[in-house]
Image: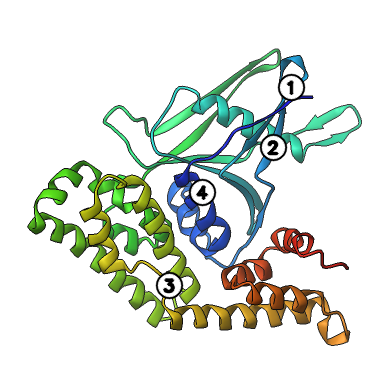
Amino acid sequence: MESVRITSTPYDDVFRTLLNDCSSLIIPVINEVFGEHYSGQERIIFSPNEHFLNQQGGNEAERITDTSFKIEGKETKKYHLECQSTADNSMLVRFFEYDTQIALDEGEIKGNVLTVTLPHSAVLFLRHTTSTPNTLKIRMVSPGGTVEFDIRVMKSQQYTLEEIFWKNLLLLIPFHIFSHEARFEEYEKDIAKLRTLQEDYRQINNKLEELLHHGAISEYTRCTIIDMSNKVLEHIAVKYNSVKEGVKTVMGGKILEYEAKTIKREGLREGLKEGLKEGIEQGEDRLSQLIARLMEDKRPQDVVRATQDKLYRNKLYEEYLIDQ
């Protein structure tokens, strides 16, 4: 069968990286979009992002969702989040394909009954207009009746910096630059106006430092947010050098050496905890080998992710050919 791969965009990649590498950022977003009251102590279990959809003619299309996961609280719920720079006519079709495939992946057959559970779904719009809806709807008409469900909508540009930090929506920080996009021409030509943009990012930097100081976020999370902010900036302001350099002057272009060392310590500490769980003290040194290889290859961020995400850890074992 012929396989067709649907590629992602830089903004999708940033969104997915934030959710997978800094999973603590997910809960406040879920609380905001779905009106939940998760404490942040719940367990998050990620599902594979790749789904193969059968098409007419025997072809398969490989679709990559931005992220789908379960949250284990008083009850277990499935969620599916997508990031869109702008709305397009095919988005609802993709949501239907993704959601039904996610449901089918964990479908259960008992007797002659197949039960599938659709995830709670939402989309983050990085740009929006007055015509952008607050909810999207999918309606399924079946011989047994009509079923409807909503796709919740979150619009990043509606959130001020004060709201982002007040509601702990730190996941939106890398996309905050979209709120300034319409003024890039002005910033490029007028240094005084550029300083207003820099002041915004100075506030972000100071707030992140404050959260780090109080132990609300880790050095790893702070550095990832800054790194992802720079990635979005590079793409959205590719034609505006003054805008790019102005923001980077405030936010920093690269992770400093002392920050990298802190990340390394965090990774090794988490690795030790996980290693003890896996039985390293009884002679099993598989995880310790992986951590050593990652640090040798200067991949401290992957150390932290590997200790938190078993599926990702297994992929790294395969990458380095570390056997059980």
Q: Which amino acid, by three-letter code, is at mark 1?
A: Asn
Helix, strand or loop at mark 2? strand
* Front residue (pair 82, 285): 285
Pointer 4: what residue? 13
Pointer 3: what residue? 255
Q: Quadrant of the N terminus?
A: top right
Q: Is residue 218 visible?
A: no
- State which mark lies toward you, 2 or 4: 4
Helix, strand or loop at mark 1? loop
CA distance for labels 2 and 4: 17 Å
CA distance for labels 2 and 1: 13 Å
Q: Which amino acid, by three-letter code, is at mark 3?
A: Ile
Q: Earlier in the sequence, mark 2 or mark 1?
A: 2
- State which mark lies toward you, 2 or 3: 3
Task: Please give the name of the residue rendered at 64% of the width and 58% of the height, measured from the top-left corner.
Answer: 74
- State which mark lies toward you, 4 or 3: 3
CA distance for labels 1 and 4: 26 Å
CA distance for labels 2 and 3: 34 Å
Residues under numbered marks 4 and 3 in contact, where contact means CB atoms less than 8 Å apart: no
The numbered disc on residue 51 is 2
